[in-house]
Amino acid sequence: MRVTLKLYASLSDFLPDEAKRTNEWPMDVPEGTTVGDMIARHQLPTRLVHLVLVNGHFIPPASRDARALVDNDILAIWPPVAGG
């Protein structure tokens, strides 16, 4: 199935060079792949995975290992952001 991974701010360093300009990485993944699988597969540091959305809907940390992705999902991940 086809999903798009979007990584923002410092997490964009984990994207391949060709995806860094748009922050989008379309890819084929096996059926049953979960949000947690994607985080682990791309070696995203847990401490940097803060805001996680699938198709614009928040996925809380406790649900990430159980939330299976489906064809054409968009998984967007942001690190913690500080500012003021």
Image (spheres, grey):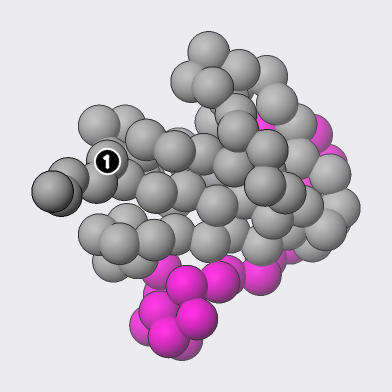
Q: Is residue 60 left or right of residue 27?
A: left
Q: Nearer the viewer, residue 19 or 31?
A: 19
Residue that lies at the very extreme toward the top in this rendered image: 62
Quadrant of the rendered image containing residue 53: top right
Amino acid residing under circle 1: Pro
Quadrant of the rendered image containing residue 36: top right
Quadrant of the rendered image containing residue 60: top right
Residue that lies at the very extreme toward the left in this rendered image: 84
Label 1 crowd bin: few (<14), some (14–19), many (20+), radius 10 Å: few
- Is 8 a magenta residue? no
Q: Is residue 10 left or right of residue 53?
A: left
Residue at 35% over, 65% down:
12
For the image, the number of numbered tags is 1
- x, y (%) of residue 41? 49, 44
Q: Is residue 45 visible?
A: no
- x, y (%) of residue 67? 70, 26
- x, y (%) of residue 2? 79, 61
Residue at 68% over, 19% down:
66
Q: Nearer the viewer, residue 9 or 15?
A: 9
Q: Is residue 31 left or right of residue 38?
A: right
Q: Which residue is mark 1?
A: 80
Residue that lies at the very extreme toward the front in this rendered image: 84
Range drawn in magenta: 15-35
Residue at 77% over, 52% down:
73
Vertical placement of residue 23 versus 63, above or below? below
- Is 32 a magenta residue? yes
